[in-house]
Amino acid sequence: MKKRSAPAARTIGRRREQERRGARYRFGFDIGGTFTDFVLIDTTSGRVETYKTLTTPVEPSRAVREGWRTLLERVGVSGEQVDSAIHATTLITNALIERKGAKAALITTEGFSDVLDTQREMRYDIYDLHSPPVEPLIPRTLRWEVKERLNNFGEVVEPLDETTIERAIEGLRHAGVEAVAICFLHSYKNPMHEQRVGARLAEALPELAVSLSHEVAPEVREYERMSTTVANAYVQPLAQRYVQRLERDLREGGFQRRMYLMLSSGGITVGETATKLPIRMVESGPAAGVLAAIFYGEQLKVRDLVAFDMGGTTAKMCLVKGGQPARAHAFEIARVHRFKRGSGLPVRVPAIELIEIGAGGGSIAWVDEMGLLKVGPQSSGADPGPACYGLGGTEPTVTDADLLLGYLNPDYFLGGRMRLDIAGAERAMNSLADRLGLTRTEAAKGVYQIVNENMISATRVHVAERGEDPRRLMLLAFGGAGPVHAYAIARALKMRGYICPAGAGVTSALGLLTAPAAFDFAQTHVTPLRQHTLADLDAVFAKLETQGRERLTEAGVAATEMRFERSVDIRHRGQGHEIVLELPWPILAKVDLDKDLRPHFYKRYEALYGHAHRHLELEVMTCRLRATGPRPVVVLPRAERGAHGAAIVVKGRRRAYLSDNGGFTDVPVYDRVALPSGARIVGPAIVEEKDSTAVIGPDAVARVDAYRNLVVTFADG
Amino acid sequence: MTRVGPAHGTTTTLALRSASRVDPVALEVQWQRLVTIVDEMDTATIRTSFSSIVGESHDFGCVIMDEDGAGLAQAQWSPPQFCTMMPITTRHMLRKFPKKMLRPGDVLITNDPWIGSTHLPDYNVVSPVFHRGRLVAFLGTVAHVSDVGGHRGDLEAVDVFQEGTRVLPTFFYREGRPVELIHEFIAANCRVPDLVLGDLNAIVGTHRIAGRRVQEFLGDYALADLRALAREIMTRSEQALRQAIAALPDGVSTCEMSADGYLEPFTLRVRVEVRGSDMYFDFAGSSPQVSHAAINAAFNMTYATTVYPIKCMLAPRIPNNDGLVRPLHVTAPEGSIVNCTFPAPVKARAKVMKHIPPLIFGALAPLLPDEVIAAAGGIFPFHLSGDDPRYGTFSVHVLPHGGTGAMRDADGWLPVAYPHNSTITPVEVVELQCPVLVLRKALIPDTGGPGRRRGGPGQEFVLKSFASRPITLTIRPDLMRYPAPGLFGGMPGAPGEVWLNGARVERFPPIEFRPGDVCVLRVPGGGGVGVPREREPERVRRDVEMGLVTPRAARDIYGVEVHEQ
C-alpha cells in the first residue's frame, strides 16, 4: 500500500504564511444531540482551548455564536485571526430519524416509482409479526414517472419523452415541493436522461433543490441508489439554509475565511459541496470522533487500534489499521426498529465504518420472558435519565450499575456539577434484582457484564470481519462512559491495553481539526478483468480524478498537494457481492494482470474469507477514488515531566467492585488533572476527571504520558 | 404416520425447575455469543456466495447445533423453516455417520428431499466442530443452489428423478480435503458447476470461520463443551413456550382450506389440540400426494412450517432453538400432500408449504385473535436461463413477493417475503446478467384484501426479452384460483395472474421466451382482517390518495365516497 507522504514541510510553510497574515487559529465545532463542543487551537503553540454548551435544537446556531464568542474572548483573539472553521453536526441525521426533512418528490423511470415502497422485499424480523414496515421518505403522492429507458449498457431503449417531463413539472409546481430526487434505471452507466430532466427542472423551477442519482450515488442496484438520492433530496433544503446561516453568523462574528464541513468519510469539504450532497454528512460527528482517536493514537505511535466511544445512548466502535479507519461504502440510516439490521434506509455513501449499538450509560436493564437479564437498546436518554440522576427515572441503567459498583463518584459526576442519587440507583437496582432472584450487587454486576458483553461481541465481529486480530490492538476509549468500561472490554478481547485521552469530553471537535480536505467518488463500471480491459479502468479513474481535482481546488488545496487513492469493488465473476480492493498502482494498463493484480486480489480475499477460487475470472463492478489534500498537523504542547518519584497524590479511597479480586475492594482514587506526566499507577485504581472516570483493573498498570493521556497495559501483556 | 418428537427424550417439569438456578447473566452472555457466531456465518455467506439466489435472494439458512445435532441458535435473518429442518437433517446424517467416525475438517452434505429440506436444490452442508480433540458442536448451512441438473421445469414432473441429481448424505470434505468424487459428481450433473461448487465451497469456508469462533468461545469461558449451555438454552426456551401454551384453554380447533395446486386444487386440513403445555397438530384429512405435479411436501417441511406460526405467536423474541419445538407435536398421514413418499416429485413444494401458516393461524384465530395474521400473497419465483452473445451463459433467479395479510392492529405490508425470508434481486442486476428488460415493477391497486385492516397489495412484474434467440423462462405462480383468505370477516386478496403476449397462461412448463415476447406476472395481495365497512373512512381516503385502492372500490366495498383529485 502507498505510504502517506509526510506533509510536515508543506504544512510548516503554510503555517508561516498564516502567521504572516496573523490567522493562526483554527476553530472546530461539533453539534451533538445533547452538547455542542468547541475547540480553538493556536497552530503555532499547539495550545487548545475547549468549550462545551447545551445544544439549542430549535436554533442550533445560537449555541454556535455563544461558543465562538466565548472561546475567542477567552484566548483574546479576533475573528480575523481564525484561519478556518470546521463543523460536524447531527442535524442531518436527526432530520432523517425524526422525519423532519423537506417536502420532497421523486421522478423516476416509468413503472418503477413503487421501488421506494417495495424496497428489498425482506423482513428485518422474521418472528415478530407486529414489527412495522420501513416508511419511505417520499409518499406515493409525490412521485412522478417519466417515459424513458436505458439498458445495462447505457443504450437508449426508450427515448426520453418530453411530455411526461412536462407533466411531472406541472405536478411538482402544483404540489409545492422544495426538493426533488431524480433516479432513472442504469443512470450510473449513462446519465444523459437524468441530466436532461435536471436541466429542464432548473429552467422551469429554479428554486427547487435537485438531486440526480448519478451524482449522488452512481452505483448499480436501483433501490439503494434511489434511497440514497431521496434521502439527499429530503435533507438538502434544510442543509442549505443551515449552512448559509452558520456562515453568516461566523462572518458576523468577524470570521473571514471559509467554513468547512465534515463528511461521514472523515474528509472535510466546503459548504457548497456539502449542501449539494448533504447525505454525505450523515455520520459527520462520529467520523470526527474516529479522527480524534487516530490523532491521539499517533501521539503515542499507536496506529492499530479500536476507537471506542460510549455515550449516553449508544456505543460506537471503529477499527483503525495503520492509522487508517475502516471504510464502508454503504450503510443504513434511521432504523425504525431500534438497531435492527434491515430496518433502516440504505444509503450508498462513503463513510468511516462504525458499528453502533444500543449500549450507553442510559441503557435500561430489563428481564425477558425467560428470566434472562438484558441491557438496552432502550435508553432513558437525558430526561429522565438514569435513576441516579434523580430526575424521575426509575428504571435501572448502566450508569446506575456503574455508580453502585463504585466506579463513579456521586459527588464528582460532571466534575461535581451533578450530584448522583445513590438511594435512587439502589431502589431501581433492587427491583431488577428481585425479578432475577439475585442480590443488588449481583444485579448491578450483571448489568455491567452484559452491557460490556454486547460491546465485546460487536467489536469482536467488526474486527474479525476485517481480517484483524484484537490481540494486536489498543482500545482508545472516549465519551463519558468509555473509560469506565474500557478495562473490561480490552481485557475480554485480550487487547494490548487501552488509552483514555485527556479531555475526552470534546474529542470529536478536536478530530475536526485533524481532518484533511477529502472527497470520495464512485462509478459503477462492470467489466471482466482482463489485460485489455485495464485501460478502460484507467479511463474511468481519470474521469474521477478530474472531478477530484475540481473538488479539492474548490477547497483550496494546491495541485501539488493532492493525492488520489484508487480502489475497485471486485468479485469472482458470477458472485453476488464484491470486496473493496485497494489498487496501489496509478496506471493499471501497465500492471501485469496475472503476476500482480490477480495475486493482489487473492491475498485480500483469502485474508477475509479463507480461500479464493483461482480458476475463475475476476469482475470489476465499481471504481472508487478518494481525493485528499494534506492533513493538517496538530501538535499539542507536551506537559512538564514530573520530578522523578514525585508524590502522586491519592485523592481518596472508595470501595469498588473489581471482579478479578472477587468482590468489593478498597481502591485508591486519583484526580486526573493532578497526575504528573510520567506518573505510574498500579491497579486496582480509579482515576477521576471532569467528564469521565477511568477504571484500572487489578492486573493493569496505567502510565500518564507527556500529553496527559492515560495509557493502560496489562501485567501479563 | 410420521412423528417427530423431542430431540433429547422427554423433559419433565421437575427437571425444568431444577435447571433454573443457572446464572441468568452468564447464560445471556454465552447464548448471545452463539447467536453472534451464526450471524457472522450468515454475513460471510452473502459476501462469498456465487449464485444470485444465495447472494441476492438470501435463500439460505445458518444454524449452530450441539454435539447431538439439536439446534442452539440460528442467524437472525435465516428463513425459519431451514433452521428447524437443519437439526433433523443433521441427526439423520449422524445415523449414517456416527460421531465417532467424524474427524476435524470433515464436511457432510446431502440434498435428499426426505432427509434434507425437501427439494433437491437445497443442499445441506454440515461440519462438526472439535475442541481439544472432542466433537462439541455442528455447524449447518442449507442453501438453494442455482442448479441440480434434471429438467428445466418446476411444476410438471412425475417423480423426483426428473428433478435432478440426488446426493444422499456423504462426505464433501474429509479431514480438510475435498472428496474429489463428489465434487466431480455434483459439477458433472448441473448446468452451472462454477456457481454451484462456488456456493458450496464458500459455505465450507464460512464453517471454518465459525468453527474457529466456537473454539475461541469455549476457550474464553474455559468450557470443555457446549453441553451445559445447550441444556440450559433449550430448557429455558421450552419452559417459556410451555408457559405460554399452558395459558391457553385446553381444547380442539380445526381449519381447512383449499389451494390452487397445479391444474387441480388440493385441500389441507389441520386439527390443533391444546392439552396442558403441549400442542398437537394433525393433518389427517389433507389431500393425497399427487403424481402429475411437483407440489408435494415431504414431512420435514410440513413440520418446520407448522411450528413457525407458533413461535411467532407465543415466543417471537426467544432466539430460535430446538427447545422451542419440544412442546409441539406434528403428525401427518403418510402419502398425503404434506407427508409425501419417495419418489414423489417435490421441487415446487412451496405451493403447499405456504398454505400451512394461514391454516395454523386460522385454527388459532379464536384463541389468539391479536396474534394471528391473514394469508399472504406469497411469491411468484421466476427463473431465466439460456445464453446470448452479449451476456454469455446465464441463470438468474428472481423472487418477487406479494403483499402480506393484515393483522387486527395493522394493515398488511406491501410486497415482502413471507412466511420465508428472502430479498428481491435488483432489476438492474437482473438486466446486467441476462438479455431481458423489466418494463415495470409496480403495486397493483385493489389487490390487498379489503377489511377493517387491509391486506398488503400485490405487485406487477413485466418482462420483455430482447435476446437474439429464444431463452427459457420458468415461473411458479400460485393463488390464481384460490386467493389469500382473510380473517374475522376480512376479504381475500386479489388472485394472481400470468400473461404471455396478451394471453392468460394456465400451465407452467418452462416457457420458450422468444425475442420480443412480453410476460406479465401479477403477484397476489394478502388477505384482510375484519369487515371492510368498519374501516375508518380516513384510512380509506388515504388508501385512495396513495393509489392503493380505487375510488370505485372505496365506494362499493368500503362504503366511502372519495372523489378523485
Image (cartoon, coloured by chain):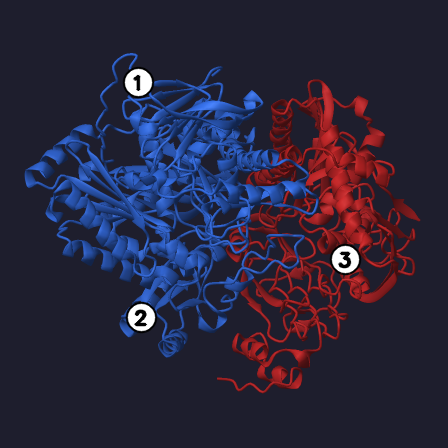
> Mark 3 against mark 2, which lies toward the viewer?
2
Q: Which chain is disc 1 placed on?
A: A
Q: Which chain is disc 3 placed on?
A: B
The 10 Å Cα crowd at callout 2, few under 14, some 14 to 19, many 20 or more, is some
Please identify the quarter of the rendering in which residue A507 is found. Answer: top left
Q: What SS does tag 3 mark?
A: loop
State the image coordinates of residue B163 (x, y, percent, origin top left). Answer: 78, 48
Q: Taking A590 as reference, is B531 above or below it?
A: below
**Chain identifier matching the blue colour in the rendered picture:** A
**Residue on which disc 2 sits:** A200
Residue A494 seen: no
Q: Amino acid at mark 1?
A: Gly
**Residue on which disc 3 sits:** B155
**Chain identifier matching the red colour in the rendered picture:** B
As drawn, the residue found furthest toward the front would be A423
Q: Give whichever of discs 2 and 1 has the lower sequence position.
A: 2
Q: Amino acid at mark 3?
A: Leu
Instruction: State how far apart marks 1 and 3 are (Cα).
Output: 77 Å
Instruction: State how far apart marks 2 and 1 are (Cα).
Output: 66 Å
Q: Residue at x 10, y 34 (%)?
A: A16
State the image coordinates of residue A380 (x, y, percent, origin top left). Answer: 50, 50
Q: Which chain is disc 2 placed on?
A: A
**Residue on which disc 1 sits:** A678
Q: Taking B96 as reference, is A396 above or below it?
A: below
